[in-house]
Image (cartoon, rainbow, N blue to C red):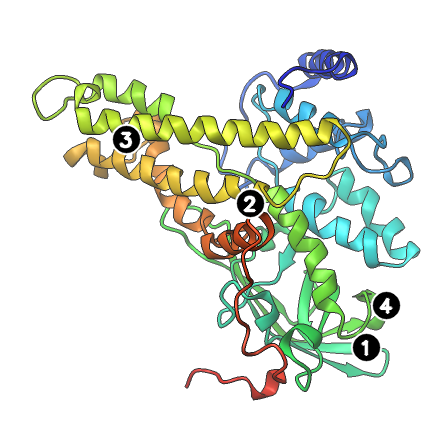
Amino acid sequence: MDFNDSPEEAAYRAQVRAWLEANAPKKPVSGNDLEGGGDTMPASKAWQAKKAAAGYAQITWPKEWGGPGGTPIQQVIFNQEEAKHPIPPNPFQIGLGMCVPTVMTFADEETKKRFVGPALRGEEIWCQLFSEPSGGSDVAAARTRAVRDGDEWVINGQKVWTTGAQFSDFGIVVTRTNPDAPKHKGLTMFWVDMKDPGIEVRPIHQMSGGSGFNEVFFTNVRVKDSQRLGAVDDGWRVSLVTLMNERLAVGGPSGAGPSEFMEAARHIPGLDGGPALKDQALREKIADWYVATEGLKHTRNRTLTALSRGQTPGPESSIGKVVSALQMQDLANTAVEMLDQYGIINDPALAPLRGGFHGSLMGAAGLRIAGGTDEILKNIIAERVLGLPGDIRVDKDVPFKDMPTGR
């Protein structure tokens, strides 16, 4: 691994730093963001437009689609430097990281010209309509039906856990078009206008107080065949493009880490009356978290080294999310327990880190599901990194209509 910037990378980092110093916000935007979709939306759109005008919105995108045609390591460098500034929430991540790349891969030229530019500039927001109540983490178990009617398709069904649907303009949806085929071979994907008649979005109130996720209901929603992405019944292949981008976009968690925990433990009384940081069992936990954090840092450095050399990172990136999401949950839970009876207080004006440990605790469980559950990512690591045999799939050749369902 090479931990240092090459001369070209160092020059690019200096260029990015200078631009951010001159253009990035100087203080955090205030308001009810609802994960980027509330009062902070104007600030988010303004920052996205400014980045797009300067060629920093999607650095790896080709010039014909509004990007500078840069390298993946340049995008990493920009992200690292941008994170040092109080930028507004980013409600465009799903669209630019997952949905629009799928449109760019499978849509016709007219559709690409219509959508890529506005999404890049932050004028339009996209959501990803994959998960369903009965499907769990199995995207191929989709039961939302699309039935052809001449040059149109009629969609009926329900999606759930759709991030940002309440403020999205468009979305990509995977549907069941051939129930006589095995589940992976009877899917078709479309793009949809989220304001179309028959689409109802119901925000899900989360225990954190936010409503980042939604239920989305489709009732006789009519879409044109020109809105289809890829071939009929080939939606699984199209979905894989989106899912691979999702693994990269979701990444590891943010939030309070071992250093923030140590700082809090210095000021919170322990069982013997001294600071909690002196408790031996707690110190062992902190040591474990620190070792894991260092391991993740070097795993990311391997990815950065591959990007810097123009190589494609492997499935090892799945390790990061499995380890960091679990650590985030364990650390936050330990912090709340360390606060004892005061752990129930998550008021930002009273709780350590403005309630940061509480936010991490309530968000970690969802993070262990979003972008691939622990079990799915462990399978990826086992099969593609360690070369172990794949899981047995007894439903591989069974027509979807013949698969058993719950009563």
The amino acid sitting under disc 3 is Lys
Please report contact status of discs 4 and 2: CB closer than 8 Å, yes or no: no
Of callouts 2 and 3, which one flags the residue occurring earlier in the amino acid sequence? Answer: 3
The residue carrying mark 4 is 226
Q: Residue 246 carries which label?
A: none
- Contact, mark 4 vs mark 3 (Cβ under 8 Å): no
> 120 above or below 155?
above
Kind of residue at badge 2 = Ser
Q: How far apart are marks 2 and 1 (CA)?
A: 39 Å
| Residue depicted at x 30% and y 21% | 262
Q: Nearer the viewer, mark 3 or mark 1?
A: 3
Mark nearest the camera among 2 and 1 is: 2
Residue located 86% across and 52% down the image: 112
Query: Marks 4 and 3: which is nearer the front?
Result: 3
Q: How far apart are marks 3 and 1 (CA)?
A: 58 Å
Q: Between 222 and 378, which is closer to the camera in this rendering? A: 378
User: Counting residues from the N terminus, which is met first, the one under dot 2 or under dot 1?
Assistant: 1
Amino acid on which disc 4 is placed = Ser
Rendered image quadrant of residue 75: top right
**Distance CA(mark 4)–CA(mark 3):** 55 Å
Mark 3 = which residue? 285
Q: Is mark 4 on a helix, strand or loop?
A: helix
Image disc number at residue 152: 1
Q: Is residue 225 visible to us here?
A: yes
Q: Which of marks 4 and 3 is nearer the N terminus?
A: 4
Q: Position of residue 54 (x, y in %)?
A: 80, 24
Mark-to-mark CA distance, 4 and 2: 35 Å
| Quarter placement of the C terminus | bottom left
Q: Mark 2 points at which residue?
A: 318
